[in-house]
Image: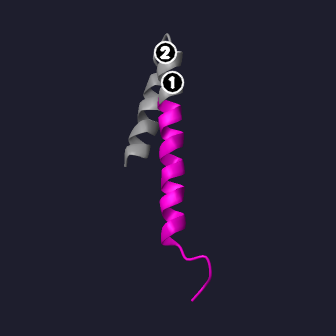
Amino acid sequence: MEHGDLDAMIDRAAHVSPIDELLMRRLKKRRLGLRDEIARIERTLTPDEPA
């Protein structure tokens, strides 16, 4: 949910003039961190070999 919220914030911020580059970088970095965390959690929940 937080990842989707960040996507929406980034989209809204991209349409504001002038664009706050620092804010955009921070939002994108946070979104990337969340995506990495989601992938890590999914890997721990998914078995490596079929049962």
Q: Position of residue 12 (x, y in %)?
A: 43, 27
Q: Which residues are magenta?
A: 27-51
Q: Which residue is at a point 49% across and 15% down the rendered structure image?
A: 20
Q: In the rendered view, would you say 14 is above or below 5?
A: above
Q: Are marks 1 and 2 in contact (CB under 8 Å)?
A: yes
Disc 1 and disc 2: Cα gap in Å? 6 Å
Neighbours of disc 2 within 10 Å: few (<14), some (14-19), many (20+): few
Name the residue beneath numbered marker 1. 24
Name the residue beneath numbered marker 2. 20
Q: What kind of secondary structure does the magenta stretch mostly adopt?
A: helix
Q: In the rendered view, would you say 13 is above or below 45?
A: above
| Visual colour scheme | one colour
- Left or right: where 9 falls relative to 42: left
Q: Which residue is at a point 47% across and 21% down the rendered structure image?
A: 23
Q: Position of residue 42 (x, y in %)?
A: 50, 64
Q: Position of residue 45 (x, y in %)?
A: 48, 70
- Label 1 amino acid? Met
Q: Is residue 4 magenta?
A: no
